[in-house]
Image (cartoon, rainbow, N blue to C red):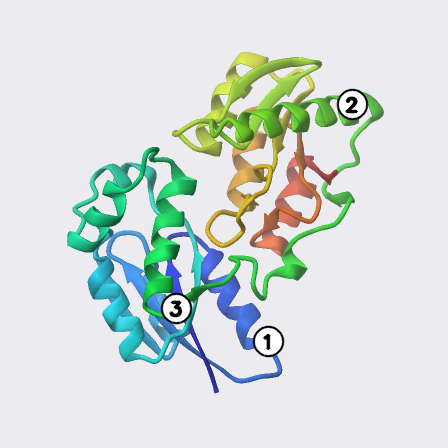
Amino acid sequence: MRTLGLIAGKGIYPETFIAGARSQAEPIRLVAAGFTGETDPSLADRVEVLEWFRVGQLSKLIKYLKKEGVTELVMVGQITPKNLFDLRPDLRVTMALAKLKERNAETLFGALVEEFAKDGITVLPATTYMERHMPGPGQVMGRPLGEDEMESARYGLGIAKETSRLDIGQSVVVREGTVLAVEAFEGTNECVRRGGQLGKGKKIILAKVAKPNHDLRFDVPVIGPDTIRICAESGIRAIAIEAGMTLVLGWDEAARLAEELKVGVVAI
C-alpha cells in the first residue's frame, strides 16, 4: 500500500485532496500533519494517522513522517499569513532560513522542500489527484461574460501575470482597462473587497493567475464558494482564472452560488 504524507492547512482543500486520493484504484494510506488553529479537527476521521504541530516545528514533523514510513508528501491548504509572522522556528528551520537572501513564499517553501529531501521525502505537486478540479479554457460556471468583459478579463490576467512575476500578488481587480486593486500580503478576499469598493459595481473583474514558472508543489491559485460570495457582496460579477492552473474547490457549492448570485467564471 502506498503511504502518502499530507501537510494540511485550513479550508476545504485538504478534504478535497483526500477525496481525490480515495477515488484512486490503488489503496493509499494517508499520514497527516495538522496545525493547531488552522487544520479542521474532523480531518482525523478521514486519514489513517493525524498528529498536531505548531508552525515551525520542522524537526518534529520530519521525525513523525519518517516514523510513519512517508517518502512522498503533499502540502495542501493555506496557513493564515499573520501566523507565519508569529513563527517560532526550531533549530532546523532557523538554520534553513539563515541561508536565504530573500524571504518570500517561493524561497521559504523551497527551503522546506530541500530539508524534506535531505531525509528522503519527496514533495509532490499540490495538484496531485486534483486534476478534475482544474478547468480548461472556456466558461466554467455562472453567467456567460460579454465581449467587453472578456477583453477586460484578458487585460486583468496580463496585469496579474506581471504582479505575480514581481512576487507582489497573483490577483488583481480591474474595470475597463483600469487597475483598481492588486493583491499583496492581505490575500485575495481583501483585495476583492477593496477593488469592489473603489469600482462601485461597474463592470468589475477579478483576475487570478499562477506565477510564471509556477512551482505547483507548494502554491496553487484557488477559488471556491467564498470567492464567489465575496465577489458578489463586493459588486464583482465576473472572475477570470488561468486555464489548467487554477483549482476550483467546493465545485458544486461554488456553481450553485455563481448561478444564484449571477457571477460568471471563465478560464482563459
What type is the residue that disc 1 sits on?
A: Ser
Q: Count numbered badges in the picture.
A: 3
| Crowdedness near tag 2: few (<14), some (14–19) or many (≥20) residues, C-alpha within 10 Å | few
In the displayed structure image, the side of residue 84 where residue 207 appears, left or right = right
Quadrant of the frame with the C terminus: top right
The image shows residue 249 at horizontal and vertical percentages of: 56, 53
The answer to whether one can see residue 233 in this image is: no
CA separation in Å, label 1 and label 2: 39 Å
| Secondary structure found at label 1 | loop
What type is the residue that disc 3 sits on?
A: Ile
The answer to whether one can see residue 92 in this image is: yes
CA separation in Å, label 3 and label 2: 44 Å
Q: Are marks 1 and 2 in contact (CB under 8 Å)?
A: no
CA separation in Å, label 1 and label 3: 24 Å
Q: Is tag 1's residue or tag 2's residue first in the polypeptide sequence?
A: 1
What type is the residue that disc 2 sits on?
A: Glu
Q: Label 2, on which residue?
A: 151
The image shows residue 160 at horizontal and vertical percentages of: 60, 27
Name the quadrant containing residue 155: top right
Which residue corresponds to the image point at 21% horizontal and 43% vertical from the top-left?
A: 87
| Crowdedness near tag 1: few (<14), some (14–19) or many (≥20) residues, C-alpha within 10 Å | few
| Secondary structure found at label 2 | helix
| Secondary structure found at label 3 | loop
The image shows residue 71 at horizontal and vertical percentages of: 40, 74
Closest to the observer: 70 or 208? 70
Closest to the observer: 13 or 184? 184
| Crowdedness near tag 3: few (<14), some (14–19) or many (≥20) residues, C-alpha within 10 Å | many
Q: Is tag 1's residue or tag 3's residue first in the polypeptide sequence?
A: 1
Q: Nearer the viewer, mark 3 or mark 2?
A: 3
Which residue corresponds to the image point at 51% horizontal and 42% vertical from the top-left?
A: 226
Q: Label 1, on which residue?
A: 23
Residue reaching furthest to the right: 147
